[in-house]
Amino acid sequence: MVQHMGKYSIFSLIRNALAYHEGWERAWRSREPQGEYDVIIIGGGGHGLATAFYLAKEHGITNVAVIEKGWLGGGNTGRNTTIIRSNYLWDESASLYEKSLQLYESLSQELNFNIMLSQRGVLNLAHNLHDLRELERRVNANLMNGIDSEILDTKSVKNFVPIINTDPNSRYPILGASLQRRGGTARHDAVAWGFARGADERGVDIIQQCEVTAIKQSRGKVTGVETTKGLIKAKKVGVVVAGHSSELARMAGFRLPLNSYPLQALVTEPVKPVLDTVVMSNAVHVYVSQSDKGELVIGAGIDGAHGYSQRGSLHVIEGQLGALCELFPITSRLRMMRQWGGIVDTCPDASPIIGKTPVDGLFINCGWGTGGFKATPGSGWVFAHTLATGEPHALNAAFTLDRFTSGFLIDEHGAAAVAH
Amino acid sequence: MANTYLRQTPLAHLHLDARAANEAADATTGVHIGERLLLGMINLRGQRSNPDFGPAVKKVVGAALPDVNKTSGKPEGVHVLGLGPDEWLIITPTGEEADIHANLEKVVGEFHTAVTLTGESMTVIRLAGAHARDTLAKGCPVDMHPRVFGPGQCAQTILARADMTMHQTADDAYDIIVRRSFAEYVWTWLEDAAREYGVRVITGLR
Amino acid sequence: MLLIPCPYCGEREESEFHQGGEAHIERPKDPNKMTDEEWADYLFFRDNRKGVYLERWVHRHGCRRWFNVARDTATNQIVAVYKMGSKPPKSITSRVTMK
Amino acid sequence: MSQSHRLSTGGSIDRETLVEFTFNGRPYKGHPGDTVASALLANGVKIVGRSFKYHRPRGIFAAGAEEPNALLQLEAGARTLPNQQATRVELYDGLSADSVNCWPGPDFDAMSFIGLFHRLTPAGFYYKTFMWPASFWKYYEHFIRHAAGLGKAPTEKDPDYYDKMNAHADVVVVGGGPSGLAATLAAARVGARVILADDQPTLGGWLLNERREIDGKPANEWIATVEAELNQMENVTVLRRTTAFGYYDHNFVGMIEQRRANVSHGGCTSRQRLWRVRAKQVVLATGAIEQPMIFADNDRPGVMLAGAVRTYVNRYGVQPGKRVCVFTNNDDAYRTALDLFDAGISVPAIIDVRSDPSGELATEAIQRDIEILDNHAITAVQGSKGVAAIEVMALNKTGDGVTGTARTISCDVICSSGGWNPAIHLHSHSGGKTVFDEERGIFLPSNTLQNETCVGAAAGIFDLARCLVDGLKAGKVAAGGAGFKKSSRSKPPSAPEEDESPARLLWVVPTTQPLGRRGKHFLDQAHDVTAADIHLAAREGYESVEHTKRYTTLGMAPDQGKTGNISGMAVLGQALGCETLGEVGTTTFRPPFTPVTLGALAGRDIGVLMDPTRMTPMHHWHDQAGCNWEDVGQWKRPWYYPKPNENMQDAVNRECLAVRNAVGILDATTLGKIDIQGPDAAEFLNRVYTNSWQNLKNGRCRYGLMLGEDGMVMDDGVTTRLSENHFFMTTTTGNSASVLEWLEEWSQTEWPEMRVYFTSVTEQYANITIAGPQARALLSEFTEDIDLDPVSFPFMSVREGTVAGVSARIFRVSFTGELTYEINVPASYGMSVWTAMMTAGDKYGITPYGTETMHVLRAEKGYIIVGQETDGTTTPQDLGMDWIVSKKKDFLGRRSFDREDNRRQDRKQLVGLLPDDHTKVIPEGSQITSSQQERPPLGSRIPMIGHVTSSYYSANMGRSFALALVKGGRKKIGEGVYVPLADGVVRAEITSPVFVDPEGAKIDG
Ligand SMILES: Cc1cc2nc3c(=O)[nH]c(=O)nc-3n(C[C@H](O)[C@H](O)[C@H](O)COP(=O)(O)OP(=O)(O)OC[C@H]3O[C@@H](n4cnc5c(N)ncnc54)[C@H](O)[C@@H]3O)c2cc1C
Ligand SMILES: NC(=O)c1ccc[n+]([C@@H]2O[C@H](COP(=O)([O-])OP(=O)(O)OC[C@H]3O[C@@H](n4cnc5c(N)ncnc54)[C@H](O)[C@@H]3O)[C@@H](O)[C@H]2O)c1
Ligand SMILES: Cc1cc2nc3c(=O)[nH]c(=O)nc-3n(C[C@H](O)[C@H](O)[C@H](O)COP(=O)(O)O)c2cc1C
Ligand SMILES: [Zn+2]
C-alpha cells in the first residue's frame, strides 16, 4: 500500500522528496460522467468548483458533477488579474463580497492548498473632485458596513506607493485614494485547483473536456444535460459559465440581461519588487499589482465590442499602458511579456445574478463581469446554499434575475467601473 | 465700438507670429505648420435625395455638394467638405460666412435642412512639407498614401486623442480642422510629432 | 483591432467607432401597455450571441452615422454591413435566428 | 588575453574597429557587428548569469530571440534596462552590462545555496507549504517575493521617448531571410505596397549565419542585390530591427522598431517606434527555431544550440569552445560540425541518436574524419560551472534507456540539436491553426483565419532552394490577393539541392537512472523547469497541457518557451501515455513574440499629451488671474480665484457674497450647446425630455430633465425655442458629447422619420455669465439694442442683439437664484468681451467666480447637479421634481417609473441638512444614520439611511449646510439624523433643500 500522502505540509513535502516525488497523489481525479447526479454544476471555473466544494462540505451533498468543457480553471478564473477586495458601495454587495473575503482569509487552511492570499492592500485613486466625493461615499459606506476602508491623501499615497507619480501638474493628478488594507491578491490557479481538490476529496466528480450542448427539461423542469460525453441526468442544475452564460440560457430557452465582452490583461517580464500593493485608477483606466514571481500584472477595461474570441483590440492595451506609464513613470522601460483576454459577462447594473431561472431546478450564477474572482468562495458558498435548499441565502437574495423586472437594481458601476 | 473688440484665434496665446519671425528658415525643414485665421464655416444638413437641393446650394455657395470624404471648391476660397451622407461643411474666407449663411437659409428653407454657423467652434491648422504626411500618420489611422488619398479629399477621423477633419489641400499640404478647445493640444501634438523632421511655424495664412 | 467598413466612409479603424449593442431592438410603440416583464425584456435582455451577431455601430469620430453590422463574435469576421432601417441580408438571417 | 576566442578570420564583424565594454564591471573588447553575446563568447566568458529558481550557473545558449538564459541588466542609471537578451543587444562602445538575479556575481552567487534544497522545491511546492501557521504566510511571502524577479526596474524617469506610426500595406512580409526577401521582391515587382520587417540589424535571416551559395555566388551577394533592388522601389518599406510582435484581428500587425542601435545615446528620434500596420495580405517568413536535445544537466554553461554555435563561428568569427561535441537527432547539426572543423576547431565527436546516419552531410563529416557515434546519447555532463566532459552511452532499441559502458569525452562546448520547429507564433496569434507533423515531430501552420500565408522555414520548408521558390510564389500570390494581378517574370534564384535524412524523435535522453535521479533534464531553462517536473504535474493530475504549464511555469518566462515548450509537451505526452504529440497540443501562443517596451505601446500619450486639456476662449485670463482649476471631463474650469493670503474657503466666501450682493462673472462656456433645427424639433424634445415642449413660446427657455430608458436621471439643462423650428439646448459640461450622441442615436435609429437635425455648437459661443443684483446695470453698459427691463426681458427668455458691439444671444436663466444673464458671444470675441466686462464691472464690485462658488450658490437654492445629487439610480421623483414630469405623454424612461422599485416609499429623496454645529461642514459622501452611534467596529454594521451629496459653508447664511439623499426623506423634514465621522458623530436636521430665497424674489435683481 502506498502511504497516504494526501495532506500537504512541509513534512509531506520532505517525505515525498525522499521518494523522488513519485508518491504524490492526484490533486483531483478526472472522472468520466455517471448517468445521474443529485446536482450538476456546469462550468469548472472557480465559482463552479467552489459551489461543488461547499455543497459537499456545508450541505453534505456529494453526488455532484462539475462539468467543464475545457480544462478546469481555464476560463476567467485562469486569466484574471487576481485582485480581491470587498469595498463595494451598496449593502447587498458589501455583505456578499465581504463574506467572500472572509472565506478567502482562511481558505488556504480550509483547502489545505496554499492559495497565496496576499493582503497587501488595494488602493483606488481619485483624480478629480468627483472621484474624491465618490470615494468618500464608498469608504463611509464600507465603514458603516464594518468593512475596513480608509482614505489617503496624496502624500500618504506617495508614502504607500513610492514609485507613483504624484506631480500635481500631471494631466491626471492624484488627489487622494481609498485603501482597503485587507484587500490584495491571491494565486488564481491555486484557487481553482484547491477547490477542485477539496471537492474531489469529498466525492464530487470533476469531469473535464466535456461540453454541455443542451439542457434537458420536461414540463418546465430540468431533467439533465446533454454533453459531448452523453446525457447526464439531474433534477438540479447550476449554470456557472461566466462569459458563456447567455449561450447556456439560450439552450434552456430563455435570455439573460447580459453582454459578453473581451477583457484583456497583460504581464511584464519579471523584475525585483517595485510595487507592494494593488493600485487601481478608474479615471485613467488601469490597475496593476506585482506578482510574487515578479511580473507586473496589468489590466484595464473591456473592449468596445461584444466578443467571444478571448482576445481583444490592441488599442485598448495602448490606452491602458499610457495610463500606467503616466502613473508609474519607471515602468516605461519594462516590457510586456504576454497579453491575453477573457470573456466577461456584464450585467446592466454591474452586479451578479445568483438564483432561480424560468426553468424549475435550473439555477444560474453569472454576470460577475470584470470582477468576480474576488467573489469566488462567497459566490460558491451562497450558490451551494441556493442549490441545496432551492432558495437563495440571505446574502444573495437581492441578486435575483427578476430584479430587472422589478427595478431593484444594485448599481455598482461606481465600485466596479474599472474592471477588476 | 466694434473694432475695439478683437477676435482671438484659439492659438493666439502661442504668439506664433513672433515665433515665425524669430525662427530662421531652413531648407531641410520637413514640416511647416501654421494656423489659418478665423475662416468662416457653415455646417449644412439636408437630403441629397431631393434633386433640387444640391443645385440650390450650389447657387449660393458656388461649389457643388461633394460626396462623403470629397471636397469641392478651392481651399483658398469657398469650399465644401462632404462630412456624411447628409452633412457638409462649407468653409469660407474670413467674414464671408455670414452672407452665405443668410442666403443659404433663404434658399434651402423649402427643404428639410439645418444651416448652422460653426466657424467659431473650430480652427484650421495648416500642415505642409515633405514630412507632413508622416507627421499625421503618427496619430491618424487613415491611409493617406497618394495611391488612395490625395488633394481634394477629406476625412473625419482622429488625430491621437482628438477628433479632426483632415483635408488634403495639395500634394504635401493638409488642413486640419479641430475644435477650438482642442487646438492647443493638437498643435502641441503636431509639433512634437514633427520634431524629428524639423518644424517651422508659418504665419499669414488666410 | 477591427477594421470596420462604414457604409459611408469606407474601412476605418475600430477606434473611430463605438459599438451600440444588439441591432433590431425596436422601441415598443406603447410602453404603457406592456407588462413589467415585457418592458424588462426590451430594456435589458439581449441575444448576446456567440457566432454571427447583429449589432449596431456608430462612426463616432467620423461621419457620426449609425449602421448595422453582422459579425461573428467568435472570430470577429465581419460578414455583412447594412444601413440603419434595412433588414439583414438573407444570407445572414439563415445563420442567426433572431430571438 | 583579449578576445581569446575570436577566430582570426571570418564573420561579418568590423574587425578594424575595436569597441570597449564592461560586463559585471570587467572591461572587454569586441567589434561593431557583435552582439553582447558574441563579444562575451569571443572573450571566453562562459557564465553570464544564474537561473531563476535554483541559481545554477548559466551561459549563452542561443544566438537570437530564443535565448532563455543570457539576460542582462543593460546600463545603469536612467537608461538601465532589465532582462535584455545578450544575444539581441548589439554591441556599442562604452556599453556596460551586468548579470541579473545573482549576488555578488554569476561566478559565485550567494543564493546558490537554494539549489541545495532543489529536492524540496519541485514544481508547485509552494502550493503545498507555507500554510502553517497561517499568520506566517506574510513572512514567507516576503522572502519569496524578494527571491523572485530577474532584473531591476529603472528608478529614474525615462530620458527617452517613444512614438507610433500608422501604416498600410498591400502586403506585409515578416522576416527578411531568403523566403521573406523573395516574397518581398515578387510582391513589390508587380507594384504592391510592401512593408518588410525583420528583427535583425541586417537582412538575410539565417543566411547570415551559414556558408551558403545562391546563383552560384556567396549568399550575401544575393542579399545585397535584392536589397539594392528593394531600395530603388518607392512602394517598398524595409524596416530593420523591427519585430512583428503581434498579429491581431483584421490583418492588423503590431511591430516594434528599435530606432537606435545604441541604448545610451539620446537624440531627436524616438528610442522605439510602434508600427500599427494594416495589411491586405500578410506573408509570414519568420523562419524556424532550433529545439535542443533534452539530456541530463543540459543547462551547463557550454551547452548551446547547434545552429547558434554555427552562427557564432560564421557570422561573428567566434569560437565558442576549443573542443566542441555535437549532439543531434538530425542532419542539420552536421553543418555545425563541418563549419567548426573548417574553422579549425576540434570536433571530438558527433553523437547522433540515429543509427547509421547516412546522407551527404554525414558523408562530409566522415570525409573530415570526425568521429560519429551513432545510436548514442549524452548521459551526463561533467563540470559544474561549465562543460568539462561528457559521458556517452549507446541507446537501447526503443531509445528509453542506455546500454553498455559510458565513454567520457572531454570538451568544453556541446552543440545540441533536436531539430527545427517553424516559428508559428504570429500565425497562431492571428487565429491560424497548427497541425503536428508526426514524422518530423514539428508543428506546422495549417488553416488560416485571415489573409495570411506562411513560407519557408516558417512553413516547415528548410531547403534553401525551395524557400526561394516558395517565397517568390507567396509574394506573388499575396500581391494578387491584394489586387495586383500583373504577371511578372521573376526567375527564381537557384541554390544547391539539399538532401537530408529524417530525424529521430527522442524527446528525453535517458541516463542510467530513472528520470530526475541523475542530473536534471531542463526544458525551460529560464524558469528552471525540468522533465521530472512535468512528470510530477502529470502524476498529480495537472494533465491538460495548460495545467502543466501553469503548475510548472513551463514557457512562462520572458522567452515564452521558444526552446522548451515543444519538448515539454512531448514529455507530458509521454507521461500521460499519449500516442502522439498532436493529442497533447500546444499551449496558446499569445503576443508578443518577444517582449515589447511598455513605453512604446503608450507612445506619446503621456505627460501633457496624455489626454487633451480643453480650454475655453477665456482660459488664459483665468490663468493669469491665478485661479485654481477644477478638471471636469477634459475641460479645465476655474474652481476659485484666491487672492494673496486667501485660503479656499476665504475665496469662496468672498465670491459667494459678491454674487448675492453685487455681481459675479463666470465662464460657463463649457456647458454643452446643441443647435436643433427642423419641423419635428419640438416633438423630438417631447420624447427625450420628461416635460412638454410643444407649447413653449418662441424666445422662451425651459428646464428639462433627460432620463435613460431605465427611468434614471441622465442629464439636465435649459433649452430655448429660438423660433418655431429652431431650438438651442444646453447640457451639463461632462455630458455634452454623450447627450448629442443620445439624440443622434434616437433620431437615426428609432425615429428616422422625424425631421430634425442636431449640430454641436458648444464651442461656437463663449458663455459669459453675469449674476447678481448689479448684473443688469453692468450689462446695460454694453448693449443698446436689447431692452433689459425685467418685464420685456423676463426670466427664462432669450434676446438676440449686440453686446459690446458683437452679435450676442443673452439668456435670462439662473443657476444661482440671482438675476443672471448668460451672454453668448462668438467664441473668438470671448476674451475681449470678458475683459471689457471686468473693466466696466469694477465699479459694481464685479468678482469672477469659479465652479465652487457656483456649486455653493446653486445648493443654497436646492438645484441639483447631475452626477452629484444623482448617481444613475436617481429618478426625478427622488429629487422632488415630479413637477417636471408630464403625466400626459410618453417619453424615454417613462415606463420604468411603474416598476415596483419605483413605487417604494423608502426610496432615497433629496432633502436639505443643517448641522447643529454651524461651523461643521460634513464631508460630501458621508453616510447618514438614524441613531447616534459611532462608526461600528470592523465586522459589525450600522444601517445607513442616506448620504450627503453636497455640503458647503454658506457665507450668506453664515453657517454650514448640505444636500442629501435620505430614505423617505421628505417625510422626515424636521427630524434629526446623524453622520458618523472619523472624529465623532455629527447631528443635523433634515430640511427642505431650498435654503435661500425660496420665493424667488431675487430673480429679477
Ligand atoms: C482579464 C480579466 C481580469 C480580471 N480581473 C479580475 C480581478 O482582478 N478581480 C476580480 O475579482 N475579478 C476579475 N476578473 C473577473 C473574474 O475573472 C471572473 O469574474 C471570475 O473568474 C469568474 O469565475 P467563474 O468561475 O464564474 O468563471 P470561469 O472561470 O470563466 O468559469 C466558467 C467555466 O465554464 C466553462 N463553460 C462554458 N461553457 C460551457 C459549457 N457549455 N459546458 C461546460 N462548461 C462550460 C468554461 O470553459 C469555464 O471554464 C477578471 C476577468 C478577466 C477576464
Ligand atoms: N536544414 C535545416 O534544418 C534548416 C533549418 C532551419 C533553417 N534553415 C535555413 O534557414 C533558411 C530559411 O529561410 P527563411 O527565410 O524561411 O527563414 P530565416 O530564418 O532565414 O529568416 C527569418 C527571419 O525572420 C526574422 N524574424 C522572425 N520572427 C520575426 C518577427 N516576429 N518579426 C520580425 N522578424 C522576424 C528572423 O530574425 C530572420 O531574420 C534557409 O536558408 C534554410 O535553408 C535550414
Ligand atoms: C495573474 C496572472 C499572472 C500571469 N503570469 C504569467 C507569467 O508570468 N508568464 C506568462 O507567460 N504568462 C502569465 N500569465 C498568462 C498566462 O500565460 C495566460 O496567458 C493566461 O492565463 C490566459 O490563458 P491563455 O493565454 O492560454 O489563453 C499570467 C496570467 C495571470 C492571470
Ligand atoms: Zn463613416
Image (cartoon, rainbow, N blue to C red):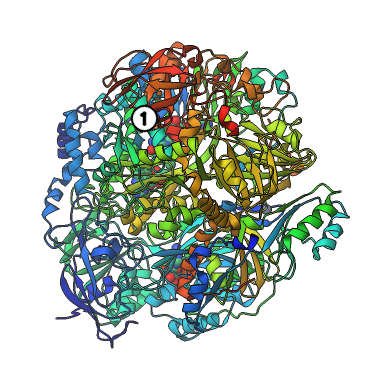
Q: Is residue D974 above or below residue D623?
A: above
Q: Is residue D892 above or below residue D65?
A: above
Q: Residues within 10 Å of mark 1 (few under 14, many from 20)?
A: some
Please identify the residue farthest to the right as the structure is shown: B52
The x and y percentages for residue D1003 are: 58, 32
User: Which residue occupies 17% across, 75% down?
Assistant: D27
Q: Nearer the viewer, residue B12 or D847?
A: D847
Q: Is mark 1 within 8 Å of ligand 1?
A: no
Q: Chain of mark 1?
A: D
User: Which residue occupies 60% across, 51% down?
Assistant: D763
Q: Indicate left or right for A363 with A185 as reference.
A: right
Q: Indicate left or right for A39 with D710 as reference.
A: left
User: Which residue occupies 19% across, 68% down?
Assistant: D46
The x and y percentages for residue D369 are: 27, 79
Picture quarter with the C terminus of chain D: top right
Q: Is residue A321 above or below residue D977?
A: below
Number of marks: 1
Q: Amino acid at mark 1?
A: Pro
Pointer 1 residue: D923
Q: Work out whether residue B67 can be spotted.
A: no
Q: Is residue A308 above or below residue D379?
A: above
- For ligand 3, the image quadrant comes to top left
Picture quarter with the N terminus of chain D: bottom left
The x and y percentages for residue A228 are: 53, 31
The x and y percentages for residue B131 are: 54, 74
